[in-house]
Image: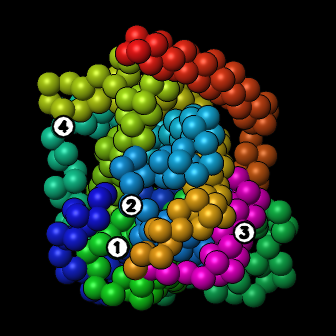
Amino acid sequence: MSEKKEGKLKKVIGFWDAMGIGIGQIIGSGIMILTGIAIDITGTGVPLAFIIACVVVIFPVTVLAFLGSAVPATGGMYTYVRDYIGKKTGFYFLVLLVAGQLVLAMFAITFAEYFCSLVPAINPTLVAFLILTICFLINIRGLGIAAKFQNVMVAVLLLALLLFIAFGVPKVDFTIFSEPNAIMPNGVIAFMTAISLLTFATGGAQFLSELGGEMKDPGKTMPRAMISSTALVGIFYAFIGVVAVGVLPVSEVAGQSLVKVANAVLPTPLFVFFVIGGGMFAVATTLNGSFTWCTKALLVASKEGWLPKGCSNISKWGTPWVLLTIFYIIGAVPILSGVSIRTIAMLGNGISLFFFIFPILTAFLIHKKNPEAMAKTPFPLKKPVLFTFAAIAIVCYGIAAALNISDITNSWILIVVITVAAIIYAHMREKYLNSKEESRLLYEE
């Protein structure tokens, strides 16, 4: 965004406005999908795992807030990696971004679980494939239906979760939290693995970094809102975790969605409301929203020549239909092949955590490579503070990614294959682009 355009933006977003936006971005399908998987990993340690996951997330979101304020850019985090680390590294970042969209299948499968709890006669694989296809077609058509109702959906979701807590807390057997090894019943590594998985559910406040030009006093408002919204949701999630693990035996809820517990604590009408308004709406809007944003960086890279020219083709409705189709296939394959939701969640989240490390690394380079931006940013962070936050974020995300991926058999082989293929392709593509540029210059001469 140019300074000229930035100057036209009205600074209308105050602290409470930013808090509302941040909470809306954090609360979504993650809580509906990952709570049961985290219980399967660490049992009664889930409430504390939620809180620690929020603390972990605060470090990278603060770094990304600084980058978003200092260098607003079309194409988001990809442009930071491309401009400050290198073009080939930027391409590798994109490869990881694409691979991480395995979570599209996770959203669709979870939608099917909630739907089939009300209509058990329907095949869940069919439901998952159909909701994935519907969201794909909506984005091809460019209607953005779910986006228009985002605020309504968030309000409905919050109400559903509040009902879950209000009816559930009185039925919790709190004695299970005082038992020996209650915090880490399956050991330290399992507890840390659950934390790493729950960073997916507790992230989202980083999107506030895109609004620095429209905030009142962004230097104070942005970090306060990011940290406060993340902390508030973390406490909210901890209560959900208490209910999820404290009402029924752990063995019954481990690896399950929140449906079983909701059915045990809510009257039938409220249970139906929870399943539809809480579970299905949250997952469907997140799935639709993922299709909306996941093509943006790839579209920029396509126009730069890193992908075949046809990948940047736009439909008559103004949507990148080729790239959307690629992501649709990535989501459909795990659904149709019967991969477990735990495998999809752990692998997809692990890869996603890896690709987030790259834009955070640019925090160590931006002071030297773009001092002008550092001097003008409305969200100033002193170099030692920025470097400390970035280092903590990289260590936490690195450990979290490794724990997620190590949970899946042969996952490291897949990562190595993806990395080698990306390096070979990037090297060959760069040579091709350089030869084209040399030919163009010779022709002009």
Q: Is residue 343 left or right of residue 371?
A: right
Image point 73% across, 57% down: which residue?
398
**C-alpha span from label 3 to label 4:** 39 Å
Mark sitting earlier along the chain (3/4)? 4
Residue pointed to by mark 4: 142
Pointer 2 and pointer 4: residues touching (CB < 8 Å)?
no
Mark sitting earlier along the chain (2/1)? 2
**C-alpha span from label 2 to label 3:** 22 Å
User: What residue range appears in magenta?
Assistant: 379-401
Question: Which mark's residue is nearer the viewer, 3 or 4?
Answer: 3
Q: Is residue 444 left or right of residue 255?
A: left
Judging depth in this view, the residue of 162 and 363 nearest the camera is: 363
Q: Residues within 10 Å of mark 4 (few under 14, many from 20)?
A: some
Residue pointed to by mark 2: 72
Q: Residues within 10 Å of mark 1 (few under 14, many from 20)?
A: many
**C-alpha span from label 2 to label 4:** 25 Å
Three-letter code, disc 1: Gly
Instruction: Using the image, determine if residue 69 lies above or below residue 385.
Output: above
Residue pointed to by mark 3: 391
Question: Which mark's residue is nearer the viewer, 1 or 4?
Answer: 1
Three-letter code, disc 2: Pro
Pointer 1 and pointer 4: residues touching (CB < 8 Å)?
no
Determine if the magenta segment contains residue 403: no
Which label was assigned to residue 325?
none
SS under mark 2: loop
**C-alpha span from label 2 to label 1:** 9 Å
Q: Is most of the magenta stretch helix, strand or loop?
A: helix
Pointer 2 and pointer 1: residues touching (CB < 8 Å)?
yes
SS under mark 4: loop
